[in-house]
Image: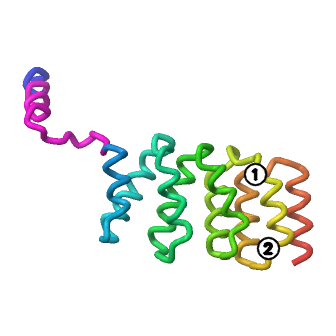
Amino acid sequence: MIRRCLSLALLLLALGAPLPARAQNLQSLLKKLDSKKSNTRVGALTKLADLGPKAAPATYRLIPFLTQFDEEERILAIIALGKIGKPALPEIEKLLAHEDEAVRYSAVWTLGLVGPGAKAHVPALLKLLGSDPDEDVRLKTVYALTQIAVDDAPTLSALVKALRDD
C-alpha cells in the first residue's frame, strides 16, 4: 500500500501536478501583489502571512500596503509583517513618524504583533504614547506595549501614567 502511494506521488510530481502541501514560490507571490485584481493580491498577502519569517524577503513589498487605502489588504500586510517579525522592524519603525495617522496606527499594530521581538522599539512607542495627536494611535500603542514589554517596569509605569493623563 505504501509503495502504491509513493508511486502515485512520484507520478504526480513527474506530471507537474502540485502536491497539496507544496508552498508557492515567493517570487510568484510577489508578482501577484502587482495584480489589478484585489482578490489575487489578497490571496498573495494571505499566503505570505502563512509563510511567516520565510517571507522576510517580501518585507519591502509589504510595507507599501500599510500606506494604502484598501483596509483588507492593509490588515493582511500588517499580519504578514507581524509574522515575519524582526526582519521587518527597521522598515516598520520608519512609519511611526508618518504624517498619516492610519499609517502610524498600522505600524504600531504591526510592532504589537511582533511582540517581545520588537522590544528595541519601546522607546519610540513610548514617545508616540505621550505625543501622538491621534487618540486611536495612542490606544493602539497601549496595545503594542502590552504585547512587547508588559513585564518591563519602566514601560508599565509609562502606561499607567498615560492612562491617568487621559
The secondary element bearing badge 1 is classed as helix
Identify the residue shown where x is 46% and y is 40%: 54
Q: Which mark is residue 74?
A: none
Taking the image as shown, residue 23 lies to the left or right of residue 2, namely right
- Return the residue nearer the eye: 30 or 121: 30
Q: Amino acid at mark 2?
A: Asp
Taking the image as shown, residue 132 lies to the left or right of residue 49, namely right
Taking the image as shown, residue 3 lies to the left or right of residue 111, namely left
Q: Name above or below for residue 84 compared with residue 107.
A: above
Q: Position of residue 105 (x, y in %)?
A: 66, 70
Q: Position of residue 93 (x, y in %)?
A: 69, 56
Q: Which mark is residue 132?
A: 2
Quadrant where the image shows the C terminus? bottom right
- Determine crowd level at label 1: few under 14, some 14-19, many 20+ residues with C-alpha closer than 10 A: some
State the image quarter where residue 15 is shown. Answer: top left
Q: Which residues are magenta?
A: 6-24
The scheme the figure's colours follow is rainbow
Identify the residue shown where x is 45% and y is 71%: 72
Query: Which residue matches tag 1?
Result: 121
Q: Reply yes or no: does residue 11 show up in magenta.
A: yes
**Of label 2 and label 1, which has the lower sequence position?**
1
The secondary element bearing badge 2 is classed as loop
Q: Amino acid at mark 1?
A: His
Q: Name above or below for residue 129 compared with residue 59.
A: below
Quadrant where the image shows the N terminus? top left
